[in-house]
Amino acid sequence: QVQLVESGGGLVQAGGSLRLSCAASGRTSSAYSMGWFRQAPGKEREAVGAIAWTYTYYADSVKGRFTISKDNAKMTAYLQMNSLKPEDTAVYYCAARGDIASGSTWRNSNEYDYWGQGTQVTVSS
């Protein structure tokens, strides 16, 4: 089992920045890839990005504004969010899977085995 705990959410003005953290514990050898997803009220869950081995993937809506990184020593993944927009408002979740996600699979939420509890990000206009 892998436990994931997100932190770093909050309220920020449009144009601001936040950094989310996702700390993994437990059987972290089962977390080869880590993804970030978000869900806004009344909307479906959306894949934001993922880091798999040395590869990073991003949704078009966040490309150039968000950056995913991972500190293997700390078993923590990060989502640096810059130039935030009101439409980025959502609950953000990190997730882990036991394989190396590819460019065609990183968006598939049902392929992630472990999920964090989520952290709220609110961007005011």
Image (cartoon, rainbow, N blue to C red):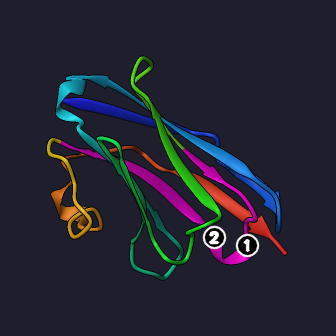
Query: What stretch of residues is rendered in magenta?
Result: 79-97
Mark 2, secondary structure of its residue: helix
Q: Nearer the viewer, residue 33 or 102?
A: 102
Alpha carbon distance from label 1 to label 2: 5 Å
Q: Position of residue 21 (x, y in %)?
A: 54, 37
Q: Quadrant of the N terminus?
A: top left
Identity of the amino acid at label 1?
Lys
Q: Position of residue 36 (x, y in %)?
A: 42, 55
Taking 103 as reference, is 84 left or right? right
Residue 65 to residue 6: above or below: below
How many numbered dots are placed on residues in this image?
2
Taking 20 as reference, is 23 left or right? left
Find disc 2 in the rendering and name its residue: 88
Residue at (38%, 43%) from the top-left corner? 116
Is 94 a magenta residue? Answer: yes
Q: Dividing the picture into quarters, in which one does residue 25 lie?
A: top left
Residue at the top extreme?
73
Q: Quadrant of the C terminus?
A: bottom right
Q: Dividing the picture into quarters, in which one does residue 86 lie?
A: bottom right
Q: Which mark is residue 67?
A: none
Taking 97 as reference, is 43 left or right? right
Residue 96 to residue 38: above or below: above
Q: Nearer the viewer, residue 27 or 69?
A: 69
Mark 1, secondary structure of its residue: loop
Dot 1 surroundings within 10 Å: few (below 14), some, or many (20 or more)?
A: some
Q: Which mark is residue 85?
A: 1
Identity of the amino acid at label 2?
Asp
Q: Position of residue 88 (x, y in %)?
A: 63, 70
Is 54 a magenta residue? Answer: no
